Amino acid sequence: MDVPGDIRGLWDRARVLSRTHPRTVDIGIALLVQAAMTMPFVVPRAPELPAATWQAYGLTTLTVLPLVWRRRAPLTVFAAILATSALYRLAVDGPGQPLPYTGLVAVYTIAALCPPRRRLATLLVLLVAVPVSVWLNTRSVRELTFSLFVFAAAYVFGRLVDTSRRANRIEAEQAAAQERARIAREMHDILSHAVSLMIVQAEAGPVAVRTAPERAEAAFDAISETGRDAMVQLRRMLGVLREEPEGDRAPREPQPGIAGLPGLLERVRAGGLEVTYEETGAVRALGDATGTTVHRIVQEALTNTVKHAAARRAHIHLTYGEAGLGITVTDDGRGARTPAAGGHGLVGVRERAAAHGGLATTGPGPDGRGFELRVELPLEPARKGER
């Protein structure tokens, strides 16, 4: 049995319950403390010890009751516990407790939930209340040392819980920000590519209707196909965002990868750009995440070419190395594009490459003409005999 895993699972469930039903948790804690403080009243006692009376037990219960509101008003609960505990010690000669349970829970709550000023005020009160309580009881250094230790431990535990909670919140916010950035890149790639091709085809359509009707029909077919493909990918993306019960989730299509490049190139060619494709090196299968990254990088590069380069030809070259994949996209267009012209596309390419530990660079094409995008992605070394 994996005991650490079981304990971690119980702790996670307790944290979820504490967030969703805090009052239920506080009532449970109060009942647990009440059960612990009941022990001295039900265990047989020596005749010389103070009697366990119903009056003393009722006052003990009154000491525990404020814990039900410990989250709502931690300092008020702490003050009420100090008052009822002092009343019990001064007015009733009842059984003592091995630990100050209620005070420990109150100090832990203040340390975990309250701002620094309130925590400091609580520590100052404890520095007075603990010695006074010890003086009224045994007046021993041993009890004073033990009491200070257990209250310090409760305070430190509360601070550790608060620190862990803050760290988890920061981690969750960072993960959410990264996911939003990923979704933004996906949406940009899908819409920018589709809309760019549709605009090019739509602008060429009226001219083709007058001069070459068969080309106009092909252009309109390309617009329709590009729009349907964009809708499919958007539905897939929105399906990832939509929260559905586990049993109602329909199987989702995989993200586009290397296998989707031929279809992508055909759609771009239908817009009038001459696109060639080449693979060199030890071609091998890529992981889903890497394949999607390659597809999106090529898609964005071609989208930028269609939108900004005024190019007639583009060339895609994938170079498979032992431990890396090179992606080169060149065109014969107007050359280096300004940041304003490039928009967010090249930024997204760099982010995708960096997410896989790679690097993206841009510059003039061969012989200083056109534009070239170069991306290097690390891959697992090819196994012997793999192709």
Image (cartoon, helix red, strand yellow):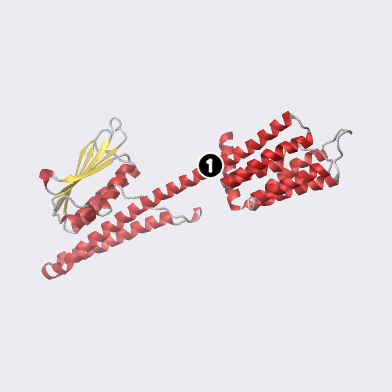
Q: Amino acid at mark 1?
A: Thr
Q: Which residue is mark 1?
A: 163
Residue shown at the point (57%, 45%) measured from the top left: 116
Q: Where, quadrant-wise, is the C terminus in this rendering?
A: top left
User: In the depicted view, which residue is nearer to us: 345 or 302?
Assistant: 345
Task: In the displayed orientation, state which residue is furthest to the right.
Answer: 47
In percent of width and height, residue 367 lies at 10, 44
Among the 4 quarters of the image, the one containing residue 198: bottom left
Instruction: Say if 8 sits above or below 217 in the image.
Output: above
User: In the depicted view, which residue is nearer to us: 363 or 146?
Assistant: 146
Is 127 positioned to the left or the right of 95 in the image?
Answer: left
User: In the depicted view, which residue is nearer to us: 208 or 9?
Assistant: 9
Q: Where, quadrant-wise, is the N terminus in this rendering?
A: top right
User: In the depicted view, which residue is nearer to us: 102 or 334?
Assistant: 102
In percent of width and height, residue 148 lies at 67, 34
In percent of width and height, residue 190 lies at 30, 56
Residue shown at the point (44%, 57%) measured from the top left: 242
